[in-house]
Image (cartoon, rainbow, N blue to C red):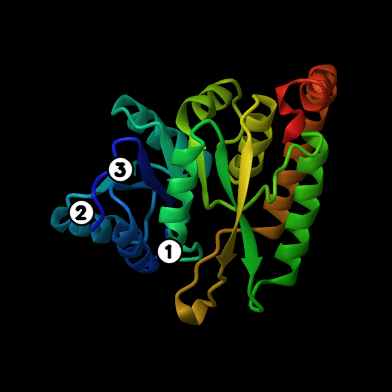
Amino acid sequence: MPLPSTSHLVLIPSYNPGRKVLATVRAARAQWTPVWVVVDGSTDGSVELLNDEAQRDPGLRVIVLPKNGGKGTAVLHGITLAAQQGFTHALTMDSDGQHPEGLIPQFMATSQAAPKAMVLGKPVFGAEAPWVRVMGRKLSNGWANLETLSFGIGDSLYGFRIYPIAPLMRVMHGTGFMRRFDFDPEAVVRLCWAGVRPINIDAPVRYFTPEEGGVSHFKYLRDNILLSWMHARLLASFVLRLPLLVWRRFFGRDRTV
């Protein structure tokens, strides 16, 4: 197992992932210490599996929230505790095995070399990726790039990424939104507005079939409505911020991004 880091941790928000979570956690632990899992009101028995695993692994911490509040809520809870313990950066990844745990050391090294930046995974899809999901994220990426004046977001939705904790906490405490599925895209847009530079790294993503133990909580109608509402809100805020963003993007320190 790798030596413990005192600045960077792996943070895994988890909601009803099934048994896939054990393989995900073990794979992440093989690459990094510490790994924290925030269980977001799961009811599938994964809490017991994770707690049993944590009893045997001191590099794993399991934090259980009593009810489901959404991915953003779980991440905010986790980074708040992490900041209290002196951590400065969190690599977030899904609990269902879709994200490439083998790239954790590369992402962490990139973040350590550029601590003021956020490190964003840019997904490389396999043939099994649902066409509707791939096209939908292209639309979301287009809006995110408009809202940031093409600040450099490679992908707005891919949750395998490293956040500097302090600015993420500031932007999250500044809004009552970005608590559920809207967390990932709104976080990167608002962090860009705050001047946090994105660094993009290609990373594969795999979609598992139900027969392979894959679990998806994405609801096409509900979540696309949520994303549309989110981008409408961000676009309105973008218009208000436009003069400052133009100045910073083209005349200030951010013009080279």
> How many labels, in total?
3
Q: Residues within 10 Å of mark 2 (few under 14, many from 20)?
A: some
Image quadrant holding the C terminus, namely: top right
- Residue at screen point 35% across, 59% down: 28
Query: Residue 221 or 95: which is nearer the viewer?
Result: 95
Numbered mark located on residue 54 in the image: 2
Q: Amino acid at mark 1?
A: Gly
Quarter of image, res 175 = top right
- Residue at screen point 31% across, 44% down: 64
Numbered mark located on residue 102 in the image: 1
Q: Secondary structure at mark 3?
A: strand
- Residue 61, image x, y percentages: 26, 46
Spatial CA span between label 2 and label 3: 11 Å
Residue under label 3: 63
- Residue at screen point 59% across, 47% down: 120
- Residue 152, image x, y percentages: 72, 42
Query: Residue 181 or 9: which is nearer the viewer?
Result: 9
